[in-house]
Amino acid sequence: MAEVIKMPRLSDTMTDGVVAKWHKKIGDVIKEGDLLADIETDKATMEFESFQEGVLLYIGVKENETAEVDSILAILGEKDEDITTLLDSVSNTSVNVDEDLEPEEIIPKTVFEVPKISIPVDTNSSQDIQKRIKISPLAKKLAKEKNINISLIAGTGDLGRIIKRDVENFDGTKSTSANVQLEAKEIPISQMRRTIASRLSTSKFTAPHFYLNMEVEMDNLMKERTLINSKNNIKISFNDIIVKAVAMALKKHPDINSSWFDSYIKFHQNINIGVAVAIENGLIVPVIKNADFKSLSDISNETNTFVEKAKENKLQPSDWEGNTFTISNLGMFGIDDFTAIINPPDACILAVGAIKRKPVIKDDIIVPGNIMKLTLSCDHRVVDGVMGAKFLSTLKNMLESPLLMFC
């Protein structure tokens, strides 16, 4: 008997998905555990395996199409089984079945097509450009006779209109690329980019952000890191140390480790640090859970694993769920300082800049030093200025005197 496979919910925030690739086709025999398709969610592209067995009779969402969670993804059954009645009986489907159509040509109503955005090739581009260029009929006729591409002609008529003399005086040997009107590329918005836009827009325009800035002297920490790495097989990064310091500072300021909900504020008991990682299609924030209980080596190993999995689109929902605080570090790209948008449901996000060699004043003497800038973005509904300032001050002290983070 035929069974419906629905678009799965592969993350807690997923509302729809895009089929990036089908690994099976109509007529294939499917076994339990077979890889059916790659599905792009709001977080990552994930492999979707079948939990059922049978012959693939129907594909409801073609490659690069979008469908809501629980809409028909596919139907499995016996070979040559009639699925018309099943399609008609599914509440979220409305189809008129044509006996001449193959099963894969029947489209459920919940599946809506992503606009097909084509990147013009040279032949189409030339035609499209000619439609938009202002040119007199006589000049257009003359250019056609002379086999001249009018996009290369500079118009001298009113509002840049090309007229007869422009065509007559046109010298193709002197044409430069500056005269060419190139088509802009248009590409479909990925599911991840769409979700990033939606979540961060909601955060920015719903949560009243305010920002606190502080400079940290990194000389002591740089010395300690060099010492640790000289005696350790695992190389500890500055970001690993910042993650640990943030976790320990949150233990001393639990009000920062919280989230705003419409009728209450949730104060989290676990300290789960999200670490922003850039990937090809956008941004993913894997979470180091219970970071306050983990060693620097543990944090380093976990972060490196997350980065590799993110690059290969192998992160699982458990890897990115449950954050209570987020760190975004652009220091490795030479960025001095920046402000980050809060990553819901967190109340704060820490933006970390590069370590820069600068003159500093110590004991009224100007000496060289290493300075890093931190910017804390706070949701004012949850965190007040003094609360944020105290947290940032504690974090600064821990980074400048690393032993404090273990006290």
Image (cartoon, rainbow, N blue to C red):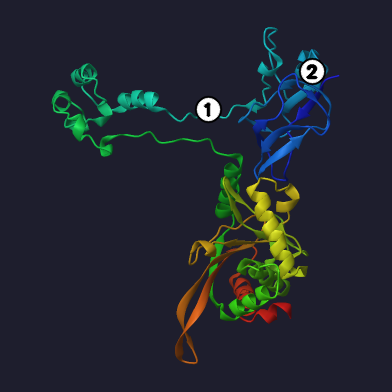
Mark 2, secondary structure of its residue: helix
Question: Label 2 neighbourhood size at 10 Å, few (<14), some (14-19), many (20+)?
Answer: some
Identity of the residue drawn at 76% across and 17% down: 88
Total tally of numbered discs in the picture: 2
Q: Are marks 2 and 1 in contact (CB under 8 Å)?
A: no
Q: Nearer the viewer, residue 41 or 241?
A: 241
Mark 1, secondary structure of its residue: loop
Mark linked to residue 62: none
Q: Residue 163: percent from the left, percent from the top? A: 17, 25
Identity of the residue drawn at 61% across and 40% down: 191
Cα distance in 3D space between marks 2 and 1: 30 Å
Identity of the residue drawn at 84% across and 26% down: 53
Please say if 368 is above or below 202. below
Please say if 47 is above or below 395. above
Between circles 2 and 1, the one closer to the viewer is: 1
Question: Label 1 neighbourhood size at 10 Å, few (<14), some (14-19), many (20+)?
Answer: few
Left or right side of 3 for 388 = left
- Name the residue furthest top: 100
- Name the residue furthest right: 1
Left or right side of 112 for 81 = right
Split into 4 quadrants, where in the image is the C terminus? bottom right
Please say if 180 is above or below 130. below
Which residue matches tag 2?
86
Disc nearer the start of the sequence (2/1)? 2
Q: Nearer the viewer, residue 217 or 340?
A: 217
Q: Residue 42: percent from the left, percent from the top? A: 64, 43
Which residue matches tag 1?
116
Residue 219 can be seen, yes or no: yes
- Name the amino acid type tagged 2: Leu
